[in-house]
Amino acid sequence: HKRIGEFIELKYANELGNYYEVLCIHFEKAGLRKKTEEYYYKTALKHKNNFNFSSALEYFNKYLEIAGVNNINNRIESNSKKVHAFINIGYIYTIIADYDRALENLNKALEIAALSDDIYTIKLMILDIYKEKGLYDDAFSIINEIETRIRPNSSIYGQLLQQKCDILRIQGNPEALQIAEKSEEVLLKTKDYDNLSETMRQAAYMYFAKGDIDNSLFYLNKAYGYAERVNNLRTMAKVSRNLGMIYYSSGMVSKALEYFSKSIEISEKISDVQSQVSGNINLGVLFMEKGLFNKAESLFNGVLETSRKVSLTYDLCLALLDLGDLMYERGEYANAFERYSQSLEIAKKHSLPSEEGINYIGL
């Protein structure tokens, strides 16, 4: 097995990625632990980058098992690769909206992380989960803890700005727009295009909320351009959804349908549950406006089921609100009242002023 593995490494050096799984088997059977670890880790990264998340999880866990996670003393040697394996597992579970498992693995990473950059990265990922679950106080406690410790020229600083901007936007705080606009200069210096694309998207969203369509389109195009530079499909899906919202509000229904569908297609490709949910909400609203109530209701109920299952608080609030609108249009006022009341309760509990106001209007 050792000879076969070494032969494959030599013979297929320029296309070795196609043989990672085979090399795992041969080097493990040969008893070469370091080589086995190396190829399990490389295989896991390959599958993650190809959005084959189930296989990526399988190989990350195999790597961690062989690397000594479950040793007799139940102690984990703190090294960068193990930390990043747990981070990657946490990232995958976040994408597929399994937040409990994501937090479990990110906390394991936090326990063994030694480098400050790794520690801050993990805490920002945990912050993102708190944000998606509507735990904004917990999210801000992390921001307050690490904001003064991160250098402005650090790539991690961009992640902090983006997350802070997003939470402030959701809470209706005008400071969010100032942070988004000022962040561009800071993040361009570090060429942090991932977080640049997200903060530009947040700026576009806020201009859209103010009714400034021109600035909204301006910042969305910037956001898409930055995301495209680094092939950030997750942000490209979000920007496509935002463009759909703008075209929908401008009465360009066909254009809106095109971008909503594009957003859902990308989200499904990368198994991004949260983006799929948001896309289905937007598509449901479009169907409702066209009088296709059954199609809209089916999408909204699907969103309710997923949001409750994976604790997507904000999307749950929106879906209940949209169902209230749908029931009202049908003349089912008792059902509409119930949905508005449920949505209002969530909005008040999680400090969502825009959604709270819209629910009061509905009631």
Image (spheres, rainbow, N blue to C red):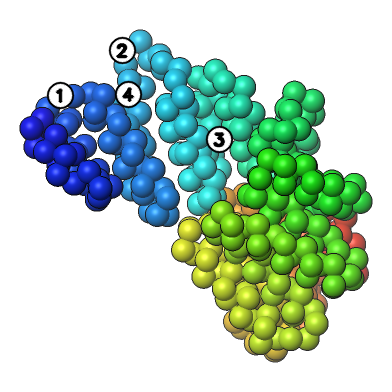
Mark number, residue 67: 4
Instruction: Identify which amino acid the numbered label 3 is placed on.
Output: Leu
In percent of the image, x 78 and y 70: which residue is there?
217
Contact between marks 1 and 3 (CB within 8 A): the answer is: no
Instruction: List the residue tagged with mark 1.
Output: 31
Displayed quadrant of residue 77:
top left
Instruction: Identify which amino acid the numbered label 4 is placed on.
Output: Ala
Instruction: List the residue tagged with mark 3.
Output: 103
Contact between marks 4 and 1 (CB within 8 A): the answer is: no
Task: Answer with mark 4 or mark 2, whichever residue precedes in sequence.
Answer: 4
Q: Which is nearer the eye, 140 or 243?
A: 243
Instruction: Identify which amino acid the numbered label 2 is placed on.
Output: Ile
Q: Distance between the residues labelled 4 and 3?
A: 21 Å
Q: Left of 255 or right of it: where is 169?
A: right
Binning the other alpha carbons within 10 Å of mark 3 as few (below 14), some (14 to 19) or many (20 upward) gives many
Instruction: List the residue tagged with mark 2.
Output: 72
In percent of width and height, residue 265 lies at 51, 70
In percent of the image, x 14 and y 34: which residue is there?
6
In percent of width and height, residue 123 lies at 64, 31
* Residue 114 visible somewhere in the drawing: yes
Q: How far apart are marks 4 and 1 (CA)?
A: 13 Å
* Residue 348 visible somewhere in the drawing: no
